[in-house]
Image (tube, coloured by chain):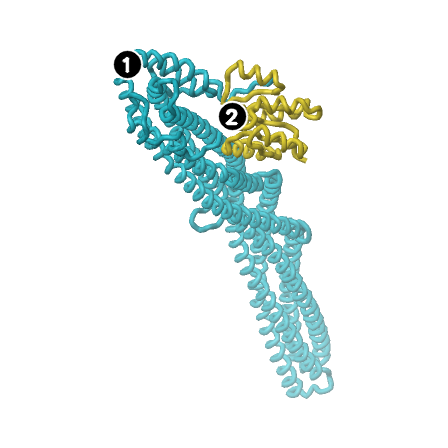
Chain colours: A yellow, B cyan
Amino acid sequence: MPKVILSVDDSRSIRQMVSFTLTQAGYQVLEAVDGKDALTKLAGAGVDMVITDLNMPNMNGIELIREVRKQTKFKFIPIIMLTTESQDATKQEGKAAGATGWIVKPFNATQLVDVVKKVLR
Amino acid sequence: MSIQQYDGSSGGRGSDALLPPGVRAEWLDGIIRSIEELQTLNVQTEDAFLSVGSQLQNIYTRTMSISDNLTQVMNNFSSDGQSQLTAKMRQITETSARFLGNFDTTSRYAVDHLGSVMQIVDELPATLKEFDRLVSQLRIMGITTRIETERLGLHNMGFEHLADEVTTLGESISKKAKEVQVSIRTIFGFVKVNEQNLVRLRSKHQGLQISVARNMNEDLQLLGEKHEVLVNVVENITRQSEDSVHSVNTIVGAIQFHDITRQQIEHVIDALKDLHTRLTNSGEDDPMPFLILVCELQPAQLQRARVEFMNAVLSLISSFGNLSNTITMMQAESREAIGFADGDGSTFFSVIGANLQNVTKALIEGEKGIHEFLDSLEQIEKVVENMKTYMEEMSEAGDEVELLALNSRVRAAKTKERGAALGVIAESIQRISTMAEIHIAEVVRSIAALVEKTDQMHELAKNSEISRAAETSIEDMTTNLRVMIDEFASSGALGKSILEQAANSSSILSKELDAMAGIVRDNRLVGDAIERIERLLSSIGRDARADAPEFVLTEVERQLEAMNERYTMYAERDTHAAYVGGTSSTVESSDPSSGSVELF
């Protein structure tokens, strides 16, 4: 069974590229358009990892992480932030919320797959 | 952030509404037009790039499939199995060459021996002719004996019987001599046929020997070289496949870059919408400082987005081209590696297969030739045996004649002077008989020589390697050769088929890449449109600044600081910093931390 990764981004293009990259690497990818949508999708599927954007309507990436970490069963699920934001202060905010790692857009396909492999090992 | 078509009237007042002091209606119109145009452009380009993205999966799959298929066929040709096949072919080449060489030696000796047999057979008719002469003399002697017996009136003394016996024995010798002659003709025929066959086969085998030695060794050398080439091609295809993956990854990056520029433009749209709201809603704040700020700073943001957008477009077009070229190169290399003789459509492997077929045929013919030769030798041996019998019978007849002659001489002696003539006749008959014995001995000697020669030929042929191996080795070799021919043929056919599939797939891929490049290329016009908006906003900013009093410009500086805090993207912060530093028009650098990974 392939591992399931939830890609959360309000940009269709980014979701498309994340999905394409990870599907090639043998993962199954689910998509959510914002934090709220992600919470719904997380509840209904056996997700092994979350890759989320930071700035999104309805619920941003950091809020999403906080909500996810509140749930016991997702306490240790890997969550990677994938965002154009690269400021240290924001990164620290994400880390404090419970993010596993931070990738600055645009991502390198090989690197993304390497990170996913690493955190899912 | 979602994109919605901007409704210019949503602020409550249009361009013809009462505007705050200093604000021109044309500026408001320009701002509304810019918002609408930017929104439209964003939607259009996003759709275009999404369309490219959606085909990426298909392109990747097709590219990898072409690469995998080509690698598979190259691997098939350069695999261990093929190396073993080459080793087997080398072994068969050596054995075949030895066998064919052995056949050549055997057949050469056989032809020499046949020449000797021919010489013996050629000499025999002359000897046999002597028998005719002797038989004729015997017949005359028989007649003379009768005449003399009658003339002398020596009846009932056995001379008539002598005459009859001499005639009969003479006829018997003549008959046997004729049978020997027939046998000789038979041997002559066999020898001739075998000589011709062997000469023909030898000449053919000499050609084949050269062909085996040259062609098969050349083929082996080529196979070795081809093997190396194929291994290199596999490595090249692997490298080119990695290049393809790199091109696809570049496309993934370019689409993301486009998305970043799309977000930058969205933020510009948001800033313009905010400005429009401030211009159309009466509030406490003077909108002029914000108008100047937005219309000066946002063109710089747009310029940056435009440059990055164009970079993404160029990167995509270049990646599509690279991908297409890589696939074409993969194909060309594979085709060249498999193809042997350009133009005739045959593959390297089919040519080797054809050469092997010739060897198989040569070995079978060689085996058949030796078998036929052995069969003929057996026939000759039978004929020679018959000849020996005939000669023994002739010898017996000669002995009888001699005894009769001796007997007649004794009887003649008894008749004293009266039968002296008959004694002379009997003496002559005895002499003829002696001559017959001499000739018979000569023929017997020739026959013995024939027997010796045929025995030697038999031994030679039977002991030749090709003959000894005929039942097992040649059969094994030809079976192996046929297996190899089949393997080469199927490898060639598989190669051709996969190359054709790859060619079709590449052709489709090439068209798809062209179509995608076309979609992306059409979006280059977006750059021109953005540039027009940049100029329009800059012109509004310039005019507003020219009209603005000092306190408004001071307020611009204050609001500049506040605006910096709203940015969420490096690109915007960087452009803002450049604007503050007065270098906004040259901003092109991208976020140095792009793609950086940090695991907590």
Q: Which mark is residue B549?
A: 1
Which residue is tagged 2?
Answer: A107
* Neighbourhood count class around disc 1 (C-alpha, 10 Å): few under 14, some 14–19, many 20 upward: few
Q: CA distance from mark 1 to mark 2?
A: 47 Å
| Frontmost residue, B411 versus B203 | B203
Dot 2: chain letter: A
The answer to whether one can see residue B428 in this image is yes
Q: Is residue B417 left or right of residue B3?
A: right
Residue B21 location, quadrant? top left
Q: Quadrant of the C terminus of chain A?
A: top right
User: Disc 2 on helix, strand or loop?
Assistant: loop
Residue at position x 61%, y 20% in the image: A99
x then y, percent, for residue B261: 43, 27
Residue at position x 32%, y 27% in the image: B18
A120 versus B101 height, above or below: above
Residue B85 location, quadrant? top right
Q: Amino acid at mark 1?
A: Pro
Residue B95 location, quadrant? top right
| Frontmost residue, B495 versus B136 | B495
Dot 1: chain letter: B
x then y, percent, for residue B215: 51, 45
A57 versus B62 height, above or below: above
Q: Which mark is residue B129?
A: none
